[in-house]
Amino acid sequence: MKLVPQPLGGSSLAKDYLAGAESANSFYRGSPYRAETYRQRAEELELARGRDGFATVESVIRPAGPDGAALLRRVVAEGGYFVTTGQQPGLFGGPLYSLYKALTAVRLAADLEGLLARPVMPIFWIASDDHDWEEANHTFVVDGANRLVRLSLGAAADRHPRPLWRPTLGTAIEEPLERLAGSFPPNDFHARYMTLLRDAYAPQATMASAFAGLMAELLADTPVGLVDAGDPQLKEACREVFRAEAEDSRASETVLDETAEALEDCGYAPQVQLMSGATNLFVDLRGGRERLYRKDGGFVLGRSRGEVSRRRVLDLIENEPRSVSPNVLLRPVVESALFHTLAYVGGPGELAYFAQLRGLFRRHGAGMPVVVPRGSLLVVETKVEKVLDKHGLAAGDVRDAEALLSRFARDRLPDDVRDAVRQWRGAIESRGGELAEAAAAVDPALRGAVIKTRNSGLGALGSLEKKIVRAVKRNADTTRAQIAKAQVNLWPGGKPQDRILSPLQYLMKYGPGFPASALRRIRIPPGRAWNGGGFATRGTDSVA
């Protein structure tokens, strides 16, 4: 098995930011590839820390293992820093990139500790306030027969959207657990992980608590700390930001609108579309989690259109803060206000929407962290590598399997068929042109009719050629099966592997060493590491 670092991709804004384009960098606090960017943020944090200390954050961080517990003590004792990342909880760990985010934070924190000579702790924020059950309730694996298997909990029991820390999994969890168990042949790791999953994803567990239990196990050998957005103590610590947002959400809307206009002036489309009158707060009431919109000095709920007074919202913040939550734009501000975040590790979408937030950070008195791209890896198993080598392919070649097979078929057409098609096409083109000229001498209006007939003939020949190619493809069953095997493992459903497959795909097959192997291959950016004032090339690690 090989773990191959991949470029992250993303919008033009994210790409320009990572490339160091000035048009993009002006919306961030500086390049994530320059040491001075982190030093400046650390100096800024020294002033903020004098006011707030560590008491609150220490109580809400759950170290994944003993290394995390020891590092947290050092951060508190020595005045260290936090690197954060996060993701909404998902079934069986969600997609691979959730794990890669955590590992990137581990890598970055270690690099920054060396740079700043202070302990730096990686934090994984479990976004359990999210209510998108349809996104969280499923994941995928590739079974022993190289079939993409969807594992799903089905629809939520509550018809109203609820934060993922609230609903329990129920007995419906048994079906995806059984499907997962049946997707892999028994080996030395099968029983271990099925036992772990049955303990974590028990009927009485929530999606958030189950995800936290699994991530703690996967990251137990790292110094990661886990934070649950639904933690009552954490929500109490969020009151100040929530209150400021409720009391003057128009000020937030103004700074967000100004930044969106500036982005558009630079040729960038804002990642998150803004809505007039919308606040950056959600409340979870009888009708489920709904966004608040301003109306007549109070608020109206976005979906049910029920009205909520300003006093009622402020009362919820004070006495029931767990029922209040930030939207996607306010969440990073809440996180930075609590943890005084040194750097945030994000995916391509997050890199883009952070460009909208500098004014919102300032409005709430929270400094903007350095925004760093998460690592992305492509897992190439030996069985897949053999297919690629046999056909002389790169991993990216098999993303569109049908296009690749069509190319193979055209290349493998019998010479006599290929020659006959080429000659026939040439004859239609040349003779059609000759006839058009001759007919035009009789009546100029005939030229168009001849050309139309010639083009119809070329189109019919093209259709015939495609039929012949399809026949060749059907006859190449072995090649088709091999390419399909490579595609489903590298590009399941034609999409990036780390956005689709669960980390259980490789844990069930290769065991608990997979996260450590992935950590060794994570680079920021791929293939580079700290060297003095920035990043420099580092030698290749051995592969798991």
Image (tube, grey):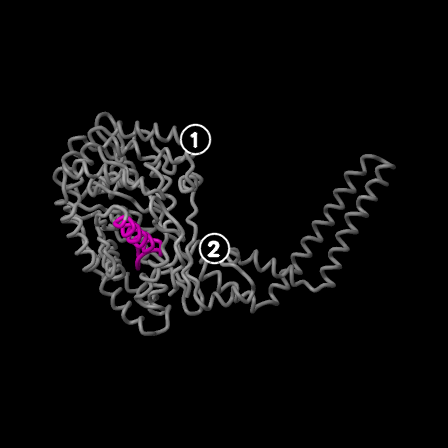
Q: Which residues are magenta?
A: 87-114
x, y percent for residue 76: 15, 48
Q: Secondary structure at mark 2?
A: helix
Name the quadrant of the N terminus: bottom left
Place residue 168 in its image quadrant.
bottom left
| Residue type at the position of mark 2 | Gly
Number of numbered discs visible in the structure rendering: 2
Q: Using the image, tell me which numbered label, if any, was put on residue 494.
A: 2
Query: Quick check: 468 left or right of 369?
Result: right
Compared to residue 146, the image places residue 32 above or below, namely: above
**What residue did someone put label 1 on?**
266
Q: Nearer the viewer, mark 2 or mark 1?
A: 1
Compared to residue 204, the image places residue 350 above or below, namely: above
Other residues around mark 1 within 10 Å, as few (<14) / some (14–19) / many (≥20): few
The stretch drawn in magenta includes residue 108 = yes
Mark found first going from the N terminus, 2 or 1: 1
Q: Residue at x 44, y 69 (%)?
A: 145
Query: Quick check: 121 left or right of 535?
Result: left
Whether residue 164 appears in this view of the structure is no
